[in-house]
């Protein structure tokens, strides 16, 4: 019995941001001892939040990268929270951050098994080399995403910049697999 709708959940959103000014990372480390800054190993300072549970890298250029959020809204909220906390700690941040979503990673389950070898032959922009990786790699053009498909029906979708693109990519893939009779339901 075919499952009508795949189950999809966003696991990680990567957002970049800028406050358009130089940041003194040593000053931030002094005022926020819970941050991690080891300039000999990595040029960015790590600022972790418990809520929303994220890590924001802050660079001296004023650029930031936030990871770990489960939605675009949460990523924007996390970056804004970091900037608010910096301001409360008397770190001068003149402008509000401009946040851009760079990548979303989602996991999903199509609810049935997949003929990966047949799918690799039938679906364009697909690669399946089981000796090197147990999943099929499918590059979708619209929306521009990369999907990793496993024989179990589980998948990973990456490359989307909007949540609706994640759902659209999985829906398009599921529809294609159904139409080409590549799904096996128990």
Image: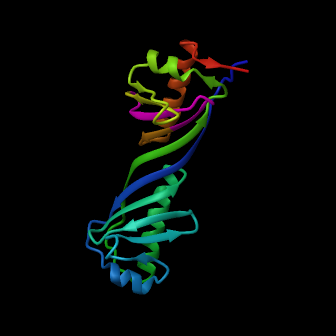
The residue under the point 43% across, 85% down is 31
Quarter of the figure that contains the N terminus:
top right
Q: Is residue 73 left or right of residue 108?
A: left
x, y percentage for residue 14? 43, 53
View extreme (bottom): residue: 30
x, y percentage for residue 34? 50, 80
View extreme (top): residue: 180
x, y percentage for residue 134? 52, 34
x, y percentage for residue 103? 42, 46
Q: Is residue 5 left or right of residue 103?
A: right
Color encoding of the figure = rainbow
User: Residue 154 colored magenta?
Assistant: yes
Q: Identify whether 59 is placed above or below 25.
A: above
User: Residue 181 colored magenta?
Assistant: no
Quarter of the figure that contains the C terminus:
top right
From which residue to which does the magenta span run?
Answer: 142-156
The residue under the point 44% across, 65% down is 56
Name the one closer to the observer, 171 or 112: 112
The residue under the point 43% across, 70% down is 46
Looking at the rendered structure, the number of numbered marks drawn on it comes to: 0
């Amino acid at each position: 019995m075919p499952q009508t709708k795949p189950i999809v959940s966003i696991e990680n959103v990567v957002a970049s941001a800028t406050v358009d000014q130089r940041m003194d990372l040593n000053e931030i480390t002094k005022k926020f001892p819970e941050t991690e800054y080891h300039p000999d190993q990595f040029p960015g300072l790590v600022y972790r939040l418990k809520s929303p549970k994220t890590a924001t890298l802050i660079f001296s250029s004023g650029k930031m990268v936030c990871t770990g959020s489960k939605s675009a809204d949460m990523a924007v909220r996390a970056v804004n929270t970091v900037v608010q906390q910096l301001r409360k700690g008397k770190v001068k941040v003149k402008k509000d951050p401009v946040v851009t979503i760079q990548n979303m990673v989602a996991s999903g389950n199509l609810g049935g098994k997949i003929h990966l070898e047949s799918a690799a032959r039938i679906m364009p922009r697909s690669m399946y080399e089981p000796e090197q990786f147990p999943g099929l790699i499918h590059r979708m053009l619209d929306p521009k995403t990369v999907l990793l498909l496993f024989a179990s029906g589980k998948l990973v979708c990456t490359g989307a910049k909007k949540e609706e693109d994640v759902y659209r990519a999985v829906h398009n893939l599921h529809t294609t697999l159904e139409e080409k009779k590549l799904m096996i339901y128990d």
